Image: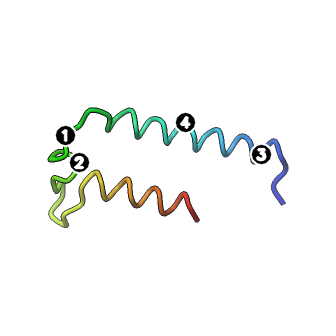
Amino acid sequence: MIDDDAKEFLHGELRDLRAAVVWKLDGLSEYDVRRPLTTTGTNLLGLVKHLALCESR
């Protein structure tokens, strides 16, 4: 079982990383977040959706 200090540390790290992603994407246009960046079609919106799904688990 994870103790309360470790849990708070991990939640703090998650909050910091979430804030960093939001900060980096803030101000981008709709086109920029949906534009495919790889040959497989990965885009920034898809990356955010993936992170949200992983975080919810």
Q: What is the CA distance from the residue labelled 2 to the residue labelled 1?
A: 7 Å
Asked if residue 38 is positioned above or below residue 29 in the image, the reply reads below
Disc 2, disc 1: CB below 8 Å? yes
Q: Earlier in the sequence, mark 1 or mark 3?
A: 3
Question: Which secondary structure lies at badge 1?
Answer: loop
Please rate how many residues cluster around mark 2, counting C-alpha atoms within 10 Å: few if below 14, some from 14 to 19, many from 20. some
Place of residue 22 in the rendered image (x, y in percent of width and height, measured from the top left): 40, 38
Displayed quadrant of residue 25:
top left
- Nearer the observer: mark 3 or 2; the answer is 2
Name the residue rendered at 15%, 52% in the picture.
35
- Give how far across and how far down residue 6 sits, in percent: 77, 45
Where residue 9 sits in the image (x, y, percent)? 71, 40
Q: In the image, is 3 to the left or to the right of 19?
A: right
Measure the C-alpha gap from mark 2 to mark 4: 21 Å
Say whether residue 44 is left or right of residue 51.
Answer: left
Disc number placed over residue 6 in the picture, else none = 3
Identify the secondary structure beneath mark 4: helix
Give the distance between the C-alpha atoms of the residues marked 1 and 3, in whole angstroms. Answer: 38 Å
- The circle on residue 51 is none
Residue 50 picture quarter: bottom left
Q: Disc 2 residue type?
A: Val
What is the x, y in percent for residue 2? Answer: 81, 55
Which residue was labeled with disc 2?
33
The answer to which of marks 4 and 3 sits earlier in the sequence is: 3
Circle on res. 16: 4
Q: How far apart, in angstroms, are the residues tagged by discs 4 and 3? A: 15 Å
Measure how far apart labels 1 and 4 are at the Cα level.
23 Å
**Picture disc at residue 29:** 1
Crowding near pointer 4: few (<14 within 10 Å), some, many (20+)?
Answer: few
Question: Going from the N terminus, do you reach mark 3 or mark 2 first?
Answer: 3
**Point 51% across, 62% down: residue:** 54
Mark 4 residue type: Asp
